[in-house]
Image (cartoon, helix red, strand yellow):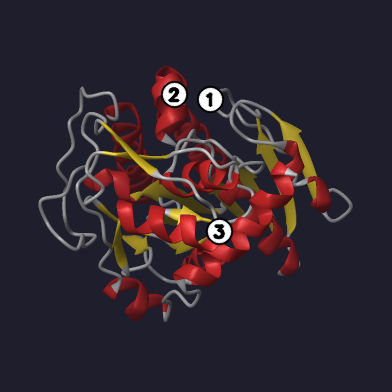
Amino acid sequence: MRTVVTGAAGFIGSHLCEALLDRGHSVIAIDNLLTGDLSNIAHLRSRDLELIRHDVTRHIDIDGPVDFVLHWASPASPVDYLELPIQTLKVGSLGTHNALGLAMAKKARFVLASTSEVYGDPLEHPQKESYWGNVNPIGPRGVYDEAKRFAEAMTLAYHRYHGVDTRIVRIFNTYGPRMRLRDGRAVPAFMSQALEGEDVTVFGDGTQTRSFTYVTDLVDGILRLMDADTNDPVNIGNPHEVTIEQIARTIITLTGSRSRIVYRPLPVDDPKQRRPDITRARTLLGWEPKVGLEEGLMKTIDYFKRKLS
């Protein structure tokens, strides 16, 4: 199999490349390194991986056959997409269009990395794939939320009108090695602060909830979806729900830090609760998460300690 992965040098993209290589795929890794990091895939360069530095908002040209196109290119943390709003919108629209065009030209199966952010600040809990969401299209987070909602719409349009074989994975909060130390998401932010003895910053009162999935569980779900016979979106996430304050206190304890928690105002449109209904993933893919929260956090802490040393 020959597989194209956009956003290949990113956190999840790099883990996907590694898993595909382990499966025996030849991987064409595309990234413009806007938020990706070559160190994430440096250990894979001696294997059957070809790196192409390219901005997918421009036409994607690949020689030879392609079996799968996995579109993972996008800023993915609030810090990134608030600083890069136009780029975020362009990669969700033009980038998705170009990646779908490649899949159509090569008769390849297309897999879109969507997100739980398509549900916005949800009024339904837990969130099923049938829920249409509660999104502020003109708020500061809308550049990411609406880019992914548009990407889903375009993906299904290519499936319905061009016959492209498509998959859509809605990714819930994921963590693990290769996250950037200070990318703005809860787990890396708390870990960086705790390991360096700084105050741990919790936005809001800490009662808002999230569901955290360890990256190997996510990748397992994505690979199962690649092989499955469904074109409908599928939630891949951990239904174990914790408050932001709980995750901060757990990280402080696991790192042995003396950091204290400080509270800052909640960002605009920050979701108050987030938990996936994974009935569809269990039924269609036989998937559910296996890595416990503390186990996954310890593996991630070990990685961050090495990065900070």
Element type at marker 2? helix
Q: Is residue 80 left or right of residue 53?
A: left
Q: Position of residue 268 (x, y in %)?
A: 22, 29
At x 71%, y 69%, the residue is 23
Q: CA distance from mark 1 to mark 3?
A: 44 Å
Q: Is residue 279 above or below residue 21?
A: below
Q: CA distance from mark 3 to mark 2?
A: 42 Å
Element type at marker 1? loop
Toward the left, the furthest residue is 123
Q: Which residue is mark 3?
A: 256
Nearer to the camera, 83 or 253: 253
Badge 1 vs badge 3, beta-carbon distance below 8 Å: no
Badge 2 vs badge 1, beta-carbon distance below 8 Å: yes
- Residue type, label 2: Lys
Nearer to the camera, 150 or 303: 303
Q: Nearer the viewer, mark 1 or mark 3?
A: 3
- Residue type, label 1: Thr
Q: Position of residue 150 (x, y in %)?
A: 31, 36
Say if residue 265 shows up in the picture: yes
Q: Which residue is mark 2?
A: 90
Nearer to the camera, 167 or 241: 241
Specify the quadrant that holds the C terminus.
Answer: top right
Q: Residues within 10 Å of mark 1 (few under 14, many from 20)?
A: some
Q: Position of residue 140 (x, y in %)?
A: 28, 23
- Residue type, label 3: Gly
Q: Earlier in the sequence, mark 3 or mark 2?
A: 2
At x 31%, y 69%, the residue is 239
Q: Is residue 292 above or below residue 119?
A: below
Q: Is residue 165 left or right of residue 33?
A: left
Q: Which residue is mark 1?
A: 57
